[in-house]
Amino acid sequence: MPNRSEPSAGTEGAKSAKGVKGVEGTEAEVEGDTDVVRFTFDGRALAARRGQSIAGALWGHGIVAWRTTRDGGRPRGVFCGMGVCFDCLVLVNGVPGRRACLVRVSEGDAVASQEGHGHGALDS
């Protein structure tokens, strides 16, 4: 059984890259790293490591909720982290219902918060 108090593989030596112009940096970035992709979330310019899930990228920026429930508008983010619960739904490039825990962030993606299941006409 892994020791949960030890850093996970690949986190040793991680640095914050606050120097990328026009993009908010995270600890997930390494300054000068060529594997950084840029994307937007609700119009805010962010960056992540290539291959990182959208949920991981948002978490890295301190964003933990990006969807609201259909009934009551309660905030939701990642719950299961493996695509089963559908709590982490976001709009990706205008397509609703994408699971942020499964979809990898790509260069230029426009990610947005989602209300309910993302199909406004069906919410009535």
Image (cartoon, rainbow, N blue to C red):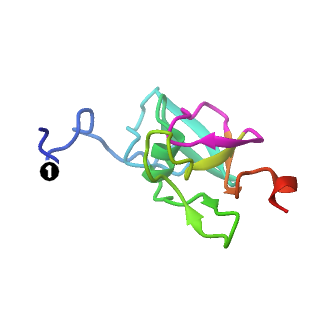
The outermost residue toward the right is 121
How far from the left and from the top, in percent, is residue 2? 14, 39
Which residues fall within the magenta stretch? 93-109
Q: Is residue 88 above or below residue 98?
A: below
| 72 sits to left or right of 122 | left
Q: Residue at x 11, y 44 (%)?
A: 3
Q: Tell me if residue 68 can be seen.
A: yes
Q: Which residue is mark 1?
A: 5
| 9 sits to left or right of 110 | left
How far from the left and from the top, in percent, is residue 109? 67, 37
Q: How many marks?
A: 1
| 92 sits to left or right of 14 | right
Tell me the amino acid under the disc marked 1: Ser
Q: Residue at x 49, y 37 (%)?
A: 53
The outermost residue toward the bottom is 72
Q: Quadrant of residue 105?
A: top right
- Image quarter where the N terminus lies is top left
33 drawn magenta:
no
- What secondary structure do most residues of the magenta stretch adopt? loop
How far from the left and from the top, in percent, is residue 22? 60, 48
Q: Secondary structure at mark 1?
A: loop
